Amino acid sequence: MRTRLLAIPAVAALAAAGCGGASDSKDASSGSAAGGAGKQQLSLVAYSTPEVVYDQVIPQFQKTEAGSGVTFKTSYGASGDQSRAVEAGQKADVVTFSLEPDLDRLVKAGLASDSATGKWVSTSVVSFIVRKGNPKNIKTWDDLVKPGIEVVTPNPFSSGAAKWNLMAAVGAKGLPYVDTLITKHVKVQPKSGREALQTFTSGTGDVLLSYENEAITAQKKGQSVDYVIPDDTIKIENPIAVTSKAPSAATGFVNYALSKPAQQVFASWGYRPVNQEVLAANKSKFPTPSGLFTIEKFGGWSKVNDAYFDPEKGSIAKIEDAAGVSTAK
């Protein structure tokens, strides 16, 4: 894992430059050593895309009574990789992942409690990120499999974003469609959702399957992209949790991440807030697609992982393997 150390003062709320962030670690300090939770460091281990959010939320939290004197060490990377790293011993007090099974892994390992599951910090939907002006006129799932269209999506065996993307495609068009999409139109599968965005904005592909929030983040950072939300798409749910041996300040941070000020930061970067008051205030920004469905359409993630992503028997795993993509976790 590539690491970097960077002090982030409270005033540097927008310090994340470019579209980087995957597999990064850094130290964040407010410079305050008194009051509130006392002087202690929290380790935040997260999936790759919300780094821009936490670069603002952490300094805001540090200005509160609960966060006074609390410093942070943060790590960002592909959701599955991050979850496995924590299971293997990487220090984590707060974890936030792309999808619930990456949290369930820690619950089963005794590193987080059952009560930690089911707490979403943000939601999103799978969208099509396209070049500015949408020159290939991509509007529907059928448009992705037209002759000559090249698609970018991450590898589902390292990235939670990729699993959401492919289950959106299964729910909208069926498994044979996914076979055609992967074998004939997906030319590259980066390791994480953030690396997939970097690949696309660097010039690869005609369309990127990704979170709605990635499209909005890219636009805020000046990238020349547009995005389309198909009528039939999946609701993405991103969990957050405190680990079993975390100090009390970790619970304070999770509570703050769910508060109105923090949820407004999520909304500003394109994440659909779970705070209903904040969501209502941003209703026009986040319309509900007419054919929106959830992972429960397929029986939940435990069934989905076995049926679609098990490296030995999963139907999508077999498609990926036939396409020459690594299915090793």
Image (cartoon, rainbow, N blue to C red):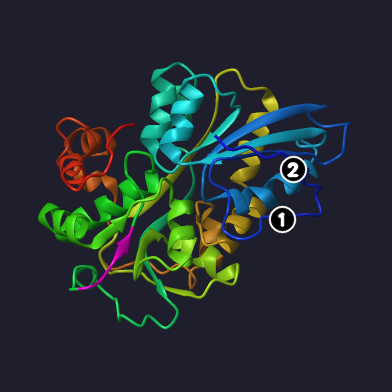
Q: Residues within 10 Å of mark 2 (few under 14, many from 20)?
A: few
Q: Position of residue 255 (x, y in %)?
A: 62, 39
Q: Tell me the SS state at disc 2.
A: loop
Which residue is at a point 57% across and 58% down the rendered structure image?
Answer: 19
Please say if 285 is above or below 56. below
Kindly identify which residue carries mark 2.
Answer: 6
Q: Using residue 151 as the reference point, say whether residue 88 is left or right of it.
A: right
Please say if 308 is above or below 287. above
Between disc 2 and disc 1, the foreground one is 2
Residue 85: within the magenta?
A: no
Q: Of 118 and 57, which appears nearest the observer?
A: 57
Please say if 304 is above or below 262. above
Pick whichever of labels 2 and 1 is earlier in the sequence. Answer: 2
Which residue is at a point 19% across and 48% down the rendered structure image?
Answer: 323
Identity of the amino acid at label 2? Leu
Q: Are marks 2 and 1 in contact (CB under 8 Å)?
A: yes
- Report how far apart the C-alphas of labels 2 and 1 lie in the structure: 10 Å
Q: Tell me the SS state at disc 1.
A: loop
Main SS, magenta region, reads loop
Q: Position of residue 108 (x, y in %)?
A: 39, 19
